Image: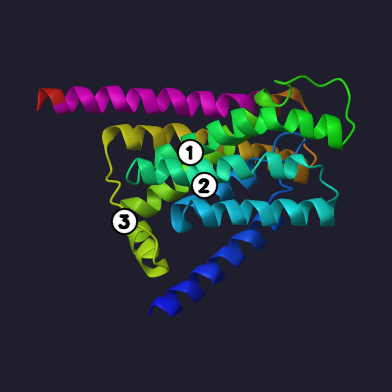
């Protein structure tokens, strides 16, 4: 049984690596790769911090070799991947903590580490220590929001815990709450942002209206999530 779980874990790890390589070019600009952060968080929750670190490292190496991506493919992934798993386990299975680990690890540590790597090893000029911080944080917020919605749905029907048990990973019961549901609503804005941006690229849509809609999507869902939280709290307090 233990050998079977190990083989299954390796298969899932290989699938996540392959998926990460394939979807990472989506919406990628230098310093921002939202889909890579999605894979990091999902891998951290399913397989743990060490497997997530290995996954991010191999994806980064493949992207560097096959796609000519600079070393930020590694510095912008490995710290967040590991801390996402660490934060998830330290919080006893809080999905939001896995997202926060990715944001902190990549958006702060990875962004700062990218400066000397890109300056000294890649020879890029005109950078500062905080040059990559805004774009890295933006990328993690987008990818992290998508990962949160996906994992929250798996957790809501008990599928996430069953998958973790089948893989031999630590499983937790991250129950639904008003706050978790509110965050899920707010996080849907990131998915809408991605859909709009992909549609603009695929169908060659022009006009500033599409950029406005992409910006309004996360703002609108954030407001909707806030109203949901307030209304549900009031109902609960009045019950």
The image quadrant that residue 62 belongs to is bottom right
Q: Answer whether residue 213 is magenta in the image.
A: yes
Q: Is residue 104 left or right of residue 76?
A: left
> In this figure, which residue is indicated by the disc labeled 1?
99
* Residue shown at 51% from the left, 75% from the top: 7
Image quadrant containing the N terminus: bottom left
Picture coordinates of residue 176, whole percent (x, y): 28, 43
Residue 104 appears in the rendering? yes
Picture coordinates of residue 155, whole percent (x, y): 35, 52
The image quadrant that residue 186 belongs to is top left
> In this figure, which residue is indicated by the disc labeled 2?
41
How far apart marks 1 and 2 lie (CA) works out to 6 Å
> In this figure, which residue is indicated by the disc labeled 3?
157
Residue 206 appears in the rendering? no
Q: Is residue 134 left or right of residue 148?
A: right
Q: Is residue 167 left or right of residue 55?
A: left
How far apart marks 3 and 1 lie (CA) works out to 20 Å
Q: How is the image coloured?
A: rainbow
Instruction: Magenta stretch: give its range.
Output: 212-236
């Amino acid at each position: 049984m233990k050998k079977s779980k190990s083989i299954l874990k390796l298969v899932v790890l290989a699938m996540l690596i392959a998926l990460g390589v394939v979807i990472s070019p989506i919406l990628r600009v230098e310093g921002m790769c939202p889909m890579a952060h999605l894979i990091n968080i999902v891998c951290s929750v399913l397989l743990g911090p060490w497997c997530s670190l290995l996954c991010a490292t191999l994806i980064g190496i493949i992207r560097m070799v096959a796609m000519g991506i600079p070393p930020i493919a590694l510095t912008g992934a490995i710290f967040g991947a590991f801390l996402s798993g660490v934060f998830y386990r330290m919080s006893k299975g809080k999905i939001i903590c896995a997202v926060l680990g990715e944001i902190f690890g990549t958006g702060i540590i990875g962004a700062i580490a990218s400066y000397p790597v890109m300056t000294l090893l890649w020879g890029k000029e005109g950078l500062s220590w905080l040059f990559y911080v805004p774009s890295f944080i933006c990328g993690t917020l987008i990818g992290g929001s998508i990962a949160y919605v996906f994992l929250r749905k798996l957790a809501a029907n008990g599928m996430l815990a069953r998958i973790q048990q089948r893989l031999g990973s630590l499983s937790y019961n991250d129950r639904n709450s008003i706050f978790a549901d509110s965050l899920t609503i707010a996080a849907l804005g990131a998915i809408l942002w991605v859909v709009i941006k992909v549609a603009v690229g695929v169908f060659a849509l022009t006009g500033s209206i599409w950029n406005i809609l992409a910006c309004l999507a996360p703002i609108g869902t954030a407001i909707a999530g806030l109203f949901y939280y307030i209304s549900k709290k009031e109902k609960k307090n009045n019950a």
